[in-house]
Amino acid sequence: MQVFDLKNHHAFPYEERQKNVFFQAENFKVRLIELPASGAMPPCEMASFVLFYVIEGKALVKVNQQSQMLFANQLLITEPAELAMQSDEGVKILGVQIVPGMNK
């Protein structure tokens, strides 16, 4: 068992996003995403299912051609898609990537 204090966990900038993966197993990986005020994550093609849980702040998340504003304590679940996000005020998000077909 492992316990992580996400409120006090530091995230690296997008350019160093691989350092933000703090847990990885065969079928999933968990990372912290932190965008500063006026920060953005450019569009990226995700081949896996993704869960985004907003710890604090808010962000506009774009999944393919649909946009949704996410606020603290909200959870977004998406199938493989092109994802992007931006935050005017800053945001801290828990991201979980899940490998498709892991239950087969």
Image (cartoon, rainbow, N blue to C red):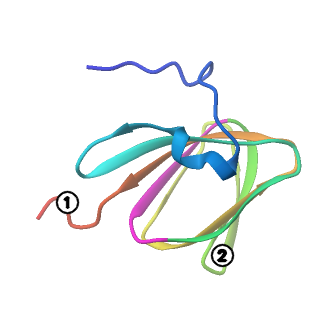
Q: Nearer the viewer, mark 2 or mark 1?
A: 1
Q: Which residue is mark 2?
A: 66
In front of the other: 20 or 72? 20
Question: Looking at the rendered structure, which numbered label has been put on residue 102?
Answer: 1
Secondary element at tag 1: loop
Whether residue 49 is in magenta: the answer is yes
The quadrant the N terminus occupies is top left
Secondary element at tag 2: strand
**Residue span colored magenta:** 46-55
Does residue 86 appear left or right of residue 61 in this picture?
Answer: right
Position of 55 relative to 33 (above/below): above
In front of the other: 36 or 14? 14
Picture coordinates of residue 99, whole percent (x, y): 30, 61
Instruction: Indicate the quadrant where residue 9 lies.
Output: top right
Q: Amino acid at mark 2?
A: Gln
Mark found first going from the N terminus, 2 or 1: 2
Q: Callout 1: few (<14), some (14-19), or many (20+) C-alpha neighbours within 10 Å?
A: few
Q: Amino acid at mark 1?
A: Met
Which residue is located at x 52 percent, y 47 percent? 18
Whether residue 53 is in magenta: the answer is yes
